[in-house]
Amino acid sequence: MATDIIRSVSAILALILVISYAVLPDKRTHPSLLIFEFFIALFLYSADVLFVLGNPKGIQCSTDIVASTQDNNLVCAIQGGILIYSTLAMALWVSAVIINLHLHTVWNSKFLVNKYIALNIICWGGPLIVTVISLVYHQVQFEFANLCLLSADWIYKLFFDPLAAIVLPSVVIHLATFFHIARVSMKESTDIEMSNSRTFGTTSQHSRQPPISHRRHVMTAFKIQWRALLLALNAMVAFLFYWVSDRLQDTVILYFELTPLIFKIFYLVQLPKLANLRDNKEMLASWIQCMMTKQDQNFCSSIVSDKLPPFALLITAEALVSLIGVIVFITFGKRSLWREWNDWIYETRMRFKKDTRRYPKHEDQFFAL
């Protein structure tokens, strides 16, 4: 329940970012529009918790003893579809951010400025196709925690493989961007040291002026877009680690979300325990018999405890996934965002003022509200 509340807070904070980027004029331009589209996907992803808030059984079970599938639980179908759609959409929009950063920083290109129609078709339409296929083939069902996702038989074909096709090229591009920034930064530092070491009396014809125009462009781009760069780096590390580790260990993964690395490790290591428990019919029968004879729950839980994730680790993983929106809000909720809201409120108030007098704007009026 506590983690559901935290995740609800993440959804609210993501919604604040969505509204901010939709309303504020400076945020409705390239490249902020790429971040705006990502925030929409993040909000859909975090808002999934609203389906289970206060009633997790409504997602987990269709009856007291039957697990939910899209066929016997409409809420499970809707929630699972949104989760699949928003996760893939987040991956695509983060990839778009990475490509834009690379083009702008390395090549000084604005190729994506007028490509938003194509970007929207790809980044929203692609996940929609995967989601529709998942629902048409009735593969959305409850597997673990409080959320429905794809069944284990289809999760590779419709989830991990498309995710890998998005992530792996983006990682290569992102690494190239980082190496370029590092190389230019180191070269600039070396040139500055060489310039400072020259004697004051050296004539201009004997001293070569360092070519700083491109380096200045790179460093300026980094200073302006470091938040987007950090967002892209974190997302790509999470996606890549999760997919590669999954393939290397040939583990049946039943659940996926864009989360910190520890959360990925949790599902990678702990989910096979549940798969093994599901196949152990004798142990399940012993546990059911214990519960039906009204034995002490602590005693009954000891029968299957070795096959379940540790409770503390489970809480940690759920807390991490719940904090995604909070972390993104802290990263992008910079002071300039609130100053833009301050300016927008002032201009709106003046626009709808009945008289035509102009009042001086108080610089901190937003913070005084």
Image (cartoon, rainbow, N blue to C red):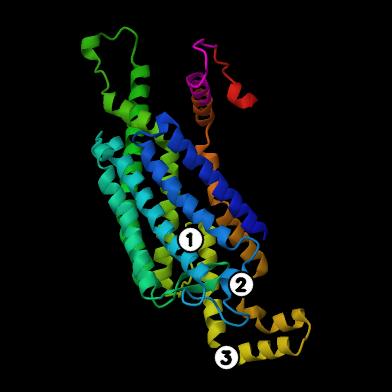
Crowding around mark 3 (Cα neighbors within 10 Å: few <14, some 14 to 19, many 20+) is few
Image disc number at residue 309: 2
Is 190 located above or below residue 314 in the figure? above
> Which of the pair 74/145 is nearer the observer?
74
Q: According to the image, label 1 marks what residue?
A: 257
Q: Which residues are magenta?
A: 345-359
Q: CA distance from mark 1 to mark 2?
A: 18 Å
Quadrant of image for the C terminus: top right
Badge 1 marks a residue whose secondary structure is loop
Q: Amino acid at mark 1?
A: Glu
* Count of marks placed on residues: 3
Looking at the image, is mark 2 or mark 3 nearer the viewer?
A: 3
Report which quarter residue 62 is drawn in. Answer: bottom right
Residue 210, percent from left and from top? 27, 22
Q: Amino acid at mark 2?
A: Pro
Q: According to the image, label 3 marks what residue?
A: 281
Residue 292, percent from left and from top? 72, 88
User: Which of pointers 1 and 2 lies earlier in the amino acid sequence?
Assistant: 1
Residue 318, percent from left and from top? 60, 61
Q: Amino acid at mark 3?
A: Lys
Left or right for 167, reference 289: left
